[in-house]
Amino acid sequence: MPGDESWHHAVTGDAIEPPASFAEQANVTDPDLREQFAREWPDCWSRAADLLDWSDDYDAVLGGDGPPFRWFDGGTLNASYNCVDRHLDERKNQVALTWEGRLGEFRSYSYLDLYREVNEFAAALRELGVEEEDVVTLYMPVVPELPIAMLACARIGAPHSVVFAGFSADALAMRMDDADSEYLVTCDGYYRRGAPVHQKNKADNAAIALDDGIEATVVVDRLGVRDGGESSDAADDAPLAADEYDYDDLVTAHRGETVEPVPRDATDQLFLIYTSGTTGEPTGVRHTTGGYLAHAAWTSHAVLDIRPEDTHWCSADIGWITGHSYTVYGPLALGSTTMLYEGTPDHPEKDRVWELIERNAVDVFYTAPTAIRAFMKWGEEHPASHDLSSLRLLGTVGEPINPRAWKWYHEHIGNGECPVVDTWWQTETGGMMVTTLPGVDDMKPGSAGRPLPGIDAKVVDGDGEPVEPGETGYLVVTSPWPGMPLSMVEDDGWFAEQRPLYPDLSEYDWAYFTEDGATVDEDGYVTLLGRVDDVINVSGHRLGTMEIESAIVGVEGVAEAAVVGGDHELKGEAVYAYVITEDGYDGDEDLRERIIAGVEDAIGPIARPEEVVFTTELPKTRSGKIMRRLLEDIANGETLGNTSTLRNPEVVEDIQSKVSND
Ligand code: WT7
């Protein structure tokens, strides 16, 4: 908790000025932009809206006295038109999407190619019965058909719900049920570290578990089996059922057809995406068409400094919000080339990422600290063996980056010449909120930076008062922003109901608590200290401890479970599960394996416990609350403070002896 002495105070390094060579050519060069935005708020945000083409102009930048907050009220637009059609005049032959598959294949789509296939697939979706406002679930790895399907949905006003391909059948079913989604686009399978993952089998199992049925399933032939490829697995070439359609057949059947982009209200939903929070079940976060797209485009322009002639690589999976905003919507809205990579960074060799950057002459590279830590560990000889001089800017997102990793990235990848933007934001914020303007602001390794122009973020104490420099507190946002989700737009109580409010924010007309702890320095630079809720950040992905616990107690032989995050060199945090067995069951290898399988079935391999510790009791306070902080300290091998306030202090030593701290 902030204020708690156990919180490490991240030491920020010396400030580094933006290189003059970069600042000269940056998209944003005005040092007074923050002041100007503050003076002109909310009208300042018309700058973001101006990056888009509107079918009907909006009447007000921020309509209503809020809530509800109606960004670009009265305006209508279509996201697919903005990301595709409007670029045809100037750059129909420029590459829009370039893709590298896991097996070394590559494909690229010009804006004209993208236009054609988005239209054809939109026509196919219509024919299958998809209407405006119907939610279409997309369950695929990073293949070009995924952004194409997203844009096809956007074209006909059907919100998409992309479910990360690594999630399990149960996780998919839960999300489809929650969204009342009756249309699914998936693939037969895909390769992961050389072995096929049977995605369609997972989708079939999800279909069985759904409350309502599926109207239609579209299957992308990723394994190439139905087209005569090879697979030893009979399941891969099973014929499609009556309500199942082959993606290529659909697109071919609609060859050359066009679909008028449906004008959507700025406040209409563009998509939804699920994220973990303090409640046991993932929450669907619904993003708007106008506000979200303007926020994604503006931050791609102002922070990632993207311009049309650039090749941009955001290495996040499109299944997460980062991929939505900075692989698909932001870069395509700006008319640049966005690069997709399906594989892993160390396959076939540990220089894979650098080889891709060199071969594609990538200008802007945006990745996660967890990846940078792995690159560091693999050694600087890998990037050194490639020409990375095409790079102009580097970015990170997802978790705090320590100054050492920041400096390594800056020096070994950016050759000391590329600014590094450490971008803080969340699934809920839709786009970047706290970071540096790369052509204007000094960089401080380890610190994200100041709130972006027009963003009212602050670090406050428990009473909602801004903290003094150097003190720790809670990061809150006290004014609405364009990328805010519909749930917040509509309902001032949303954040209060969904989240146990730590700080008292009653003095603000409106406020959003991010559930991150932070500190701020005398220049207003915010350093993030991690989550204050029961969320674990594994490799930059939010996982709810309650979700994992409920998966574990669902395993036969488990009586009780507590899940916490322990520090992990590469992943940032790892899942530690403390488990009490039921009478008659032993905490043996068999149960451990069933627990891991149970978590993988309920959520997916990403939530797999790093360690399962069997114990007879969990450390509890006299009032019966599990002492999670103590379990975290044990996971991290830290010396424990006073345990005498526990009801059962004797269990601590026993648990400690069972945890391997390596
Ligand atoms: C949480 C949001 C939207 C980006 C991908 C993750 C942490 C994100 C940073 C950063 C420190 C960061 C926060 C935040 N986080 N970026 N630059 N520095 N922490 O999206 O899954 O919604 O997770 O990721 O804890 O609350 P998400």
Image (tube, rainbow, N blue to C red):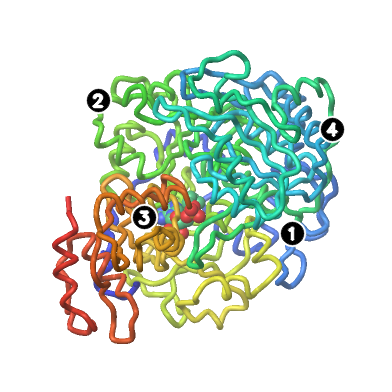
Residue under label 3: 447
Residue under label 2: 381
- The kind of residue tagged 3 is Ser
Tell me, yes or no, whether the two marked residues, 2 and 3, touch with CB atoms within 8 Å.
Answer: no
Secondary structure beneath label 2: helix
- The kind of residue tagged 1 is Val
On the rendered structure, is 241 left or right of 606?
right
Quadrant of picture, ligand 1? bottom left
Front residue of 205/76: it is 205
- The residue at the point 17 percent across, 54 percent down is 660
- The residue at the point 76 percent across, 26 percent down is 250
- The kind of residue tagged 4 is Val
Q: Quadrant of residue 85?
A: top right
Of circles 2 and 3, the one toward us is: 2
Secondary structure beneath label 1: strand
In whole angstroms, how far apart are the C-alphas of marks 2 and 3?
27 Å
Q: Decide if residue 525 is in sight here.
A: no
User: Callout 3 environment at 10 Å: few (<14), some (14 to 19), or many (20+)?
Assistant: many
Q: Which mark is residue 259?
A: 4
User: Callout 2 environment at 10 Å: few (<14), some (14 to 19), or many (20+)?
Assistant: few
**Lower position in the chain sequence, tag 2 or tag 1:** 1
In whole angstroms, how far apart are the C-alphas of marks 1 and 3?
31 Å
- The residue at the point 78 percent across, 29 percent down is 119
Quarter holding the N terminus?
A: bottom left
Residue under label 1: 61
Of circles 2 and 4, the one toward us is: 4
